[in-house]
Image (cartoon, helix red, strand yellow):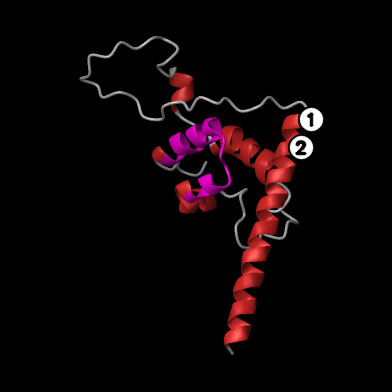
Amino acid sequence: MRRLAVVLVMAAAFSSLVIQLQCASRRIAGVTAGTPAPSPTPVATRPSPAGSQASTSPAASPSPSEATIDFATRILPLLQERCSPCHFPGGRMYDRLPFDKEMTIRLLGTRLFTRLRDPEDQEIVGAFLEQSPQPAR
């Protein structure tokens, strides 16, 4: 019985490693195929408090059009680039974690950052998660 438990744990660890390597290799292939490398400097995700005396440049403050992050136009394309084909229709993880559904991303929250390691991607998804869900149109 103990050997069976050890084998099951090892199989789970191995499959997790294989999935991580596949996602990583796909990401590396995207970078070498002409996608620009991620910026090495992390960008702050929280704005300064309203009462602070820090000066803000126009580039640092978001414009009104960037204030709301739309799932379909900003988040979905990012996830399609990073997480296809596994988490989209036809993929092996789609039944458990369908990334084309906004509610899945909201439920996962920042746990999604275990796969999205680029600071720019994390900033976009983090800002999306901080805003309240939009009513269905």
**Left or right, residue 130 beside residue 22:** left
Looking at the rendered structure, which numbered label has been put on residue 46?
none
The image shows residue 15 at horizontal and vertical percentages of: 68, 64
User: Front-most of 8 and 69?
Assistant: 8
Visible in this render: residue 87? no
Q: Are marks 2 and 1 in contact (CB under 8 Å)?
A: yes
Assign the N terminus to one quadrant of the image.
bottom right
**Left or right, residue 137 beside residue 25:** left
Question: Callout 1: helix, strand or loop?
Answer: loop
Visible in this render: residue 40? yes
Q: Between marks 2 and 1, how big is the CA–CA gap?
A: 6 Å
Instruction: Say which quarter of the image contains residue 24.
Output: top right
The image shows residue 61 at horizontal and vertical percentages of: 40, 17
**Position above or below: 42 against 133:** above
The image shows residue 9 at horizontal and vertical percentages of: 59, 73
- Residue found 73% across the figure and 49% down from its top: 85
- Residue found 60% across the figure and 32% down from its top: 73
Indicate yes or no whether the magenta region holds residue 37: no
Please, what is the three-letter code of the amino acid marked with disc 1? Ala
User: Front-most of 64 and 26?
Assistant: 26
- Residue found 56% across the figure and 40% down from its top: 117
Question: Around disc 2, counting alpha carbons within 10 Å, would you say few (fewer than 14), some (14 to 19), or many (20 or more)?
Answer: few
Please, what is the three-letter code of the amino acid marked with disc 2? Ala
User: Front-most of 10 and 28?
Assistant: 10
- Residue found 50% across the figure and 24% down from its top: 41
Q: Main secondary structure of the magenta part?
A: helix
Name the residue carrying label 1. Answer: 33
Name the residue carrying label 2. Answer: 29
Highlighted magenta segment, given as a residue range: 111-129
Question: In the current view of this chain or complex, which residue is farthest to the bottom?
Answer: 1
